[in-house]
Amino acid sequence: MNLQMSKWDLSAVEGAFAEAVVGSQEWKGALETVVSITESHGALLLPVTGGVLRTLPFTESMSGSFDSFVRDGWHLRDERNRGIPLMQKSGVVDDLDIFSAETIASHPYYQEFLAPHRLRWFAGVGIFFEDDIWCLSIQRRIDQDPFSAAEKSKLAQLSRSLAASAATARVLGEVASSGALEAFAASNTAAVLVDRHGKIFEANAAAERLLSGEIRLKNGKLVHVSEATFPSLDRALSRVLNQAKAGLHAPVPLQRKERGPLLAYPARLQRTMGNALADCQAIIVLVDPDVRKNPAEATLRSVYKLSGAEARLAIQLATGEALDEVAGRLSISKETSRTQLKSIFAKLGVHRQAELVAVLSTLLTGVG
């Protein structure tokens, strides 16, 4: 065991991951701890079982190479994926488990992708929970040594201990996403949960009722009863899953033959997007304009103490329409509309338009 190896204290990594899971520090901070302890260049957390890449956590030192990894399509031809079976078996894999030094010296993946970023060696630490597989990818530069056998032995132990973090993250993710569904259910608003693959895996009772007509839920997707899919919703959901901030997407009309379109509002939730290992990464709020009625201005003023102008703005925003469009219709400036919206949020105790829609839904009748 070399001098560098003797300094390794992987309990610090375990602690950092535990803190990231419960939200007391960001995932990037946990990965920085990995880099510091293993005296490496950078680290990132990759889903072996697929899913969104743009919002995955990585250290700042990996920003350039990660951008190239996704932008130039190297994630679709990642030669290190050859080592996944070994990682599943032993908990850790490195480059020399996959290729010889001679192959690495001439292979396009190493010479065309990694070399321009001064990268060469990696160790992939498996994180396993049920059917989910993640790889803690620890990166070293060309001028550093590959991971030794003793270091890999330590990392294999880390793989086993991080399984507990994955299990905790999954449970906390379920609690947070279930809480979000319940919040919408309390206002009789239809909503469904979406995983990082873009598949719907849970719906509240209001959504189940709403999706019993022309539009149905099938194999994790919203489809028309005729089996037609909605590519526009898939594109919107992809954009939402790849955005770094929580927020509500503009409504996507899901056309129906016998009625007006059903409106789908994809959104990322603050309470779940910070948990990289959680199942739920997005939500879709469903609104049926044919049966939904706007809350009366007098009711909003009475119940929530809104001013007349605030009530009129809230009524327009209740369907999820963009603030700028509503401001134009009401002939008020963008600055005024933002000031009024801030006041509305404060009086209703919400922070985002998706939450506003949910709260105002308590005054709507006939949903679903």
Image: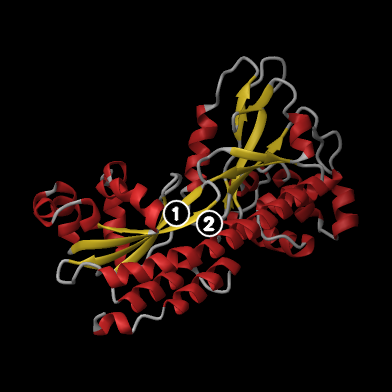
Residue 352 vertical position relative to residue 52 in the rendered view, above or below: below
Percent x, y of residue 214: 70, 20
Residue drawn where x is 76% and y is 63% of the image: 349
**Residue 336 visible in this rendered orientation of the protein:** no
Label annotation for residue 134: 1
Residue 118 vertical position relative to residue 80 in the rendered view, above or below: below
The reply to whether discs 2 and 1 touch (Cβ–Cβ < 8 Å) is: yes
Residue drawn where x is 76% and y is 45% of the image: 315
The residue carrying pointer 1 sits among few (fewer than 14), some (14 to 19) or many (20 or more) residues within 10 Å by Cα, namely many
- Amino acid beneath label 2: Leu
Label annotation for residue 277: 2
Residue drawn where x is 56% and y is 64% of the image: 164
Percent x, y of residue 54: 41, 51
Q: Is label 2 in a helix, a strand or a loop?
A: loop
Q: Is residue 350 left or right of residue 362?
A: left
Which one is earlier in the sequence, the residue at label 2 or at label 1?
1
Residue drawn where x is 61% and y is 54% of the image: 269
